[in-house]
Image (spheres, helix red, strand yellow):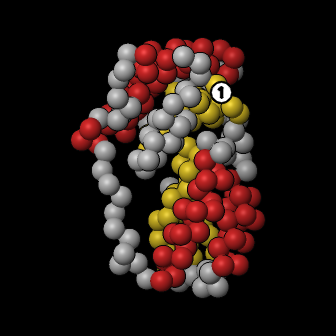
Amino acid sequence: MFIQTEATPNPSTLKFMPGREVMGTQAPMDFPNEDAATASPLAVSLFRTGLVEGVFLGSDFIAVTKKDGEWQHVKPALLAAIMDHFVAGLPVMNEQALSQPGDDSQDDPTVSAIKQLINTRIRPAVAQDGGDIVFHDFTDGVVSLHMRGACAGCPSATATLKQGIENLLRHYVPEVIEVRAVI
């Protein structure tokens, strides 16, 4: 098994691509700490290295945020944990943790338009950098988004949010006044 790695805009996060599906068509999963990782045997094994601060599982990649240290010292242990997991044939997620996304059919037309733009134009772009952006709320012209994976804590996240996402949403959805990140 050959696992490729790729830098992300967040210097603390590295994208690992095992050459196979990780979450596949399931929704991406974000584990911001070890306590949240119990639903994923893969995330648990990465946290057990003692080197990891966060794990994000995308369709075909794993974005890992390190605690500290240089990547040249951290990466070998993470590569070994990922390889051991897949070679052993272990599941990425516990079966009971996998659930279907909620029904969006009751959304107001403005919220539906915002979600469609996020899912079709924004999420695929940020996934290339090892992250994810998820709709949280739309109130009084303000769109609130969760930034996950490499996007969480990224030095360029504010610029991406304001200059990229906000401009795109304001262009296509005139009701949008501002975009904010929520934790």
Residue topped by disc 1: 5
Q: For residue 10, which quarter of the picture?
A: top right
Left or right: 29 in relation to 171: left
The front one of 39 and 2 is 2
| Place of residue 60 in the rendered image (x, y in percent of width and height, measured from the top left) | 53, 37
Q: How many marks?
A: 1
Res 50 seen here: no
Q: For residue 18, which quarter of the picture?
A: top right
| Place of residue 24 in the rendered image (x, y in percent of width and height, measured from the top left) | 45, 42
Vertical order, 179 against 53 (above or below): below
Residue at image position (65%, 14%) is 73
| Place of residue 2 in the rendered image (x, y in percent of width and height, measured from the top left) | 59, 18
Vertical order, 75 against 176 (above or below): above
Res 131 seen here: yes
Q: Secondary structure at mark 1?
A: strand
The front one of 151 and 108 is 108
Residue at image position (44%, 40%) is 23
Q: Residues within 10 Å of mark 1 (few under 14, many from 20)?
A: some
| Place of residue 146 in the rendered image (x, y in percent of width and height, measured from the top left) | 52, 57
Vertical order, 116 against 66 (above or below): below
The three-letter code of the residue at mark 1 reads Thr
Residue at image position (72%, 72%) is 167
Left or right: 30 in relation to 8: left
Q: Quadrant for the N terminus, please.
A: top right
